[in-house]
Image (tube, grey):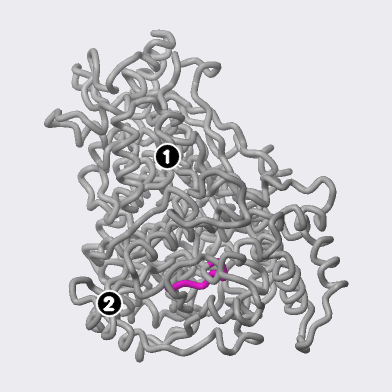
Amino acid sequence: MGIKGLQSFVQNSCPRACSMVNLQSMANRHKSTHPESTPTIVVDAMGCLRTWYTPNDWIHGGQWKEYLSSLECFIATFEKAGIKLVFFFDGVIEQKKRAEWTKRRLRDNIEIEKIFSFLKANRQQPGRNKFFIPSGIATFTRFALKALKQQIICTRVEGDYEAAAYALQHNCLGILGEDSDYIIFNTAPYFSINKLRLDSLVTLMYSREHVCEELRIRILDLPLLACLLGNDVVPENSVDGFQKKCAASYHSQTKEGNRRAFVIRAVASFISSIQHKPHGLEEVRKMLPPRFDMELLQKGIESYILPEQTSPWVFQGSYLCDNAYKKETTVCQDREIVQIALDGHYNGENTMICNVLCLGESDCSNTLEDENDPQIPGQALIFKTARQHIYAILLGTGNGSPDTCPVVNEWYVYRGNQLQTPELVPAVPLPIPGGTPTIRSLWLSEDPDIQRRRFYTCMACFHVEGWTEELRGLETHLAATCCLLIYLAVQVESLSLTDMEAFLAQALCLPGKSPSQLNSLQHPFVDSRAVHLAFLFLRGLITLMGASCACGYPFTMMDLMPWNTFDGNLFHQKYLQCHGQKPLVEIIERNETLISQFKKLRTLITDACAAQGRTLKPDPKGENWPLSVRSSSGSSGNSFSRHQQSEYNPQYEYHSERHQQWNVQRQHQNNRGPRADFEDTEGPYQGNYEYGRRNTGQRPWRGDKRGRGHQFSNQWQH
């Protein structure tokens, strides 16, 4: 995350520390001096995301096929130059940096509110100065790079530390990113991603040696300088008084154009004056406020000391960053499961799973959602129920009672949550026959039918397990889309039938679109509600990825990637068409096969919702009928009557009878007592049940009626 103002200071005030270099030439020199190794650049992926996302349209939910294409181009350029890339992603937020993380999340909330205010006032995408990177892009980028056969490392400590250590240990050409912390680490050279010209592989290289010459300090002093200027460990406001003292006693021979540059020189001058004293750290303490936490300063300095390095500014002790995932302190006590999770995490699989198993913690950054829309709760609240079921799979359910269920510390951004402390979220057992299956049974079982069991359990996390067979019969990206749409419709009362149709039309039309076709789509205006829904769906995909991982991968991760399931530009087009009462044949682009598939999937979704007591309504504005019943008769926006449903969907009567039968079965199961829901064991397929179907041949047991969107009514109003 870096040190405020340091990088611009180096660029503007230390000209010898900045030089344009050709990475191809550097790679050639490396080959001549180290013929046994491939020239390698460590890529701080988190610092490159904004640069990699080149599509012009970002407000609609991401143009993911185009993004994937731009990543391919980036990688191909380096491969042509004979340069290997190793990509690092942050895998954990260390507790010492949680306060800074929280501060940035709250600041981003303000920026998001400004974006939606602009959208509502202007009905167009804001300028690039308000650019907000699409939600989930870090997660999706990991899998994009894996699909492109790149080496991915998801860190177990702070990402920049592990990237710097790897670059030093493997004698890499340098580190490509945009984080001034790389000026502080004593490691390989630091290259700027923002200054990179991909066509020529020329970029800006920072020299920490020349920075030190300019400031008259040693490389060993850089970690102390970073902490006294304020960084992610030592808050800037805690050293503000110290900086003022340094500035007051500093007489610069160099004229600086801004206050921050003057402060940097003043602090460096103070360090230079004490660097040879035997008790230099004591001199620092005297300048700091009386109650300043010196242990925090020590931690900040140590966070820059790489393996086998030492520092004159720390007390005796270890210089290594603590591994956040210590096996002896993990929440999950199954060592085999923990090791599998750690291995998957390091290779860039699902970080949520590892963090829950090892730390009992889960976090989620900002989402582009309209906090002032009372009809759509925050995505963190909408998908909370699904996450609670995932936690139950990962950590167990105690003895099935709320008092004994494990609790996960959640740091999720939503309206009203100031993130001062984590929210304690209990695991919730899956209300399925046989109870919640164990993670061992889902991950390690060699049962020939295990994939069916995994899929059933995954669907149960979203309360659609009764439709397992129907969903398994679909193409994977369509099964994922239908699962999420059913869940969203039940959880969010304001989600209309018209909204669902737009999502469904997008999913069906996406496979036939090229990146250039998607990029060329034009919209008469930008609808802020469509923007909100698009990013809500993306968060749903990430939640489904977590459920799939917890259940042993009934979906492959690539099947769930947005370039296979969702494009923001295409969704916006379909949303405007559906709400603009365009004919179905136009919306589905005159493809009879897709039109037929659209009708079948719409029936599946509406039936699944009806089985949970949720009847999807047309456009909530009360202006538009569903696509197949467009008429001039008008609508008050009320849901269909039984007669209208039968006319709209000939199978309605049949499905209604099925739903009545299931309600009887649900009542029968309820009368059996709590053990019917929370029996122990290895999975939901024990006793007289098999894959959610009773041996009597009846349709799947549906479980209790699910809670709907109104359950959030008091939670998102604050």
* Residue shown at 47% from the left, 57% from the top: 309
Q: Amino acid at mark 2?
A: Ile
Q: From this viewpoint, is residue 553 visible?
A: yes
* Residues rendered magenta in the picture: 176-181
**Is the residue marked by circle 1 packed among few (<14), some (14-19), or many (20+) residues within 10 Å?**
many
- Front residue of 506/307: it is 307
Q: What secondary structure is marked by label 1?
A: helix
Which of labels 2 and 1 is toward the front? 2
Residue found at the very far top of the displayed protein: 672
Return the mark for residue 501.
Answer: none
Up the image or down, 577 lies above or below 550; here it is: below
Task: Kindly report the distance in space between the C-alpha atoms of the residues bearing marks 2 and 1.
Answer: 52 Å
Q: Which residue is mark 2?
A: 83
Image quadrant occupied by the N terminus: bottom right
The mark total stands at 2
- Front residue of 227/396: it is 227
Residue 227 at x, y = what percent?
Answer: 66, 60
Q: Which residue is mark 1?
A: 609
Residue 293 at x, y = what percent?
Answer: 74, 46
In the picture provided, is 322 more to the left or to the right than 29? right
Q: What secondary structure is marked by label 2?
A: loop
Image quadrant occupied by the C terminus: top right
* Residue shown at 38% from the left, 72% from the top: 67
Q: Amino acid at mark 1?
A: Cys
Residue 33: quarter of image: bottom left
Whether 180 is among the magenta residues is yes
Q: From this viewpoint, is residue 372 visible?
A: no
